[in-house]
Image (tube, rainbow, N blue to C red):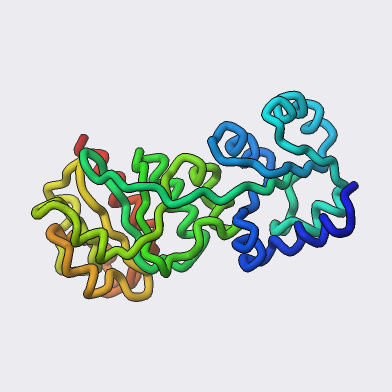
Amino acid sequence: MISKNELKLLTSYKHSKYRNEDNIFVVEGIKMTQELLASNFEIIAIYAADDLWITENESYIRSKTIPLHEITTTELQKISSLTTPNKVYCVVKQNENGDVCYENQLTLVLESIKDPGNFGTIMRLADWFGVKTILCSQDCVDVFNPKSVQASMGSIFRVNVIYNNLEGCLQNLPQGFPIFGTLPQNGKNIYDASLSNEGIIIIGSESFGISKEIKAFVNQPLTIPRFSIQKDKPESLNASMATAIILSEFRKRL
């Protein structure tokens, strides 16, 4: 059991205002918690409503001096953001923006991605394809949005996500540094293009694509060709679908 005040505090974390005020985010579920425990993120507290899970993990959690609280299923349902709460709920400290190293690696750049599910899936794809850093425009969805966290399936703990002014970052790159931009048309067919294992890959929003300000930095435009026999249908791929195709094609060239 937890106190009424603590229950009220944890319930407030369903709202980004209170999470950001306390500089925390929430991780839920047994699998996600195991991923979290293996990471370097600072865990403030763990709340569990499963006796078996507590028995199996208590000694390890206590050895890391992480507060562990046993709660009821009813309490878990009140604090959880999930439709079907999954046994364990963790309060975790948000990490600070790190530095970006562009040399000798691929860096994913996201502009104006608003959908948290898409964002989490892109983190998962970056993790799968060995992309260590995602640089985001400041109007992208919050990486610590509960839907982004869940959709990442643990990749949030392994991929460095940074928010910054994209124009400022791109204009400071060395002249001629490969900057690939995904365009709906008029880019080089990605299946014919010369790709590298060093460079920036820019993914724009589903609604507007890459803005003209950021497009000005692109020196290697790419397009995923549409093979549909129905003209102009479908109109586009969502951001995570496009990212999967693009990263797969880049890694094929290793």
Q: Residue furthest left?
A: 176
In the picture, residue 232 is in which quadrant?
A: bottom left
How far from the left and from the top, in percent, is residue 173? Answer: 18, 54
How far from the left and from the top, in percent, is residue 7? Answer: 83, 57
Residue sitting at x 58%, y 51%: 150
For the C terminus, the quadrant is top left
In the picture, residue 20 is in which quadrant?
A: bottom right
Left or right: 30, with 243 as reference point: right
Left or right: 209, with 60 as reference point: left
**Does residue 229 sit above or below 180 in this rendering?**
below
Q: Nearer the viewer, residue 34 or 171?
A: 171
Residue sitting at x 21%, y 42%: 103
Asked whether residue 226 appears in the rendered view, the answer is no
**Does residue 24 sit above or below 138 in this rendering?**
above
Asked whether residue 239 appears in the rendered view, the answer is yes
Q: Nearer the viewer, residue 92 or 77?
A: 92
Residue sitting at x 46%, y 68%: 114
**Does residue 52 sit above or below 96 in this rendering?**
above
* Numbered disc total: 0
How far from the left and from the top, in percent, is residue 19? Answer: 64, 60
How far from the left and from the top, in percent, is residue 134? Answer: 37, 51
Residue sitting at x 76%, y 61%: 11
